[in-house]
Image (spheres, rainbow, N blue to C red):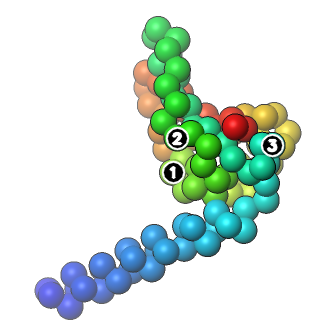
Amino acid sequence: MMKRNALAALVLAATTALVPAQAVSAAPAGGGGLVNVVVKDILNGNETTILNNVAVGVAAAVCQIDLAVLTSQLDQHGKGDCPAKTAIDQVAYVVNA
């Protein structure tokens, strides 16, 4: 059991270490590659920025969306999906900073 927990911790650490490397290799979109992740309440229209001026790769990891897909959405529409932070009463999206 102890070996399994140690292995799980090692896999988690290795996976976490990959996110910054992916962010560094991200193609810049808009304002120097920096984006904001915004959550909008569907009922009252209030918007809250949950991540401000972060690399596109970081936003892709938080939103659980492929980096190439998010970059393409930002390049084409100036806005990208954030499915991991979208819920029944809120919609989340990524915009160029």
Marks 1,3: beta carbons within 8 A: no
| Residue to which mark 3 is pinned | 30
Q: Residue furthest top?
A: 44
Residue sitting at x 39%, y 77%: 13
Q: In this view, does 44 lie above or below 47?
A: above
**Within 10 Å of the Cα at label 2, are there few (<14), some (14-19), or many (20+) other Cα atoms?**
some
Q: Where is residue 94 in the image (x, y as percent from the top left)?
A: 64, 38
Q: Position of residue 68 (x, y in %)?
A: 74, 57
Task: Specify the amino acid type for callout 3.
Answer: Gly
Q: In which quarter of the image is residue 6?
A: bottom left
Q: Which of marks 1 and 2 is nearer the N terminus?
A: 2
Query: In the rendered image, is residue 75 in sight?
Result: yes
Task: Specify the amino acid type for callout 2.
Answer: Leu
Cα gap from disc 1 to disc 3, whole angstroms: 19 Å
Choose mark 1 or mark 3, whichever is in front: 3
Q: In this view, does 34 lie above or below 15?
A: above
Marks 3,2: beta carbons within 8 A: no
| Residue to which mark 1 is pinned | 62
Q: SS class of the residue under badge 2?
A: strand
Residue sitting at x 80%, y 43%: 30
Marks 1,2: beta carbons within 8 A: yes
Q: SS class of the residue under badge 3?
A: loop
Q: Earlier in the sequence, mark 1 or mark 3?
A: 3
| Residue to which mark 2 is pinned | 51
Residue sitting at x 69%, y 47%: 34
Q: Position of residue 92 (x, y in %)?
A: 55, 32
Q: Which residue lies furthest to the left in this view?
A: 1
Q: Position of residue 15 (x, y in %)?
A: 47, 74
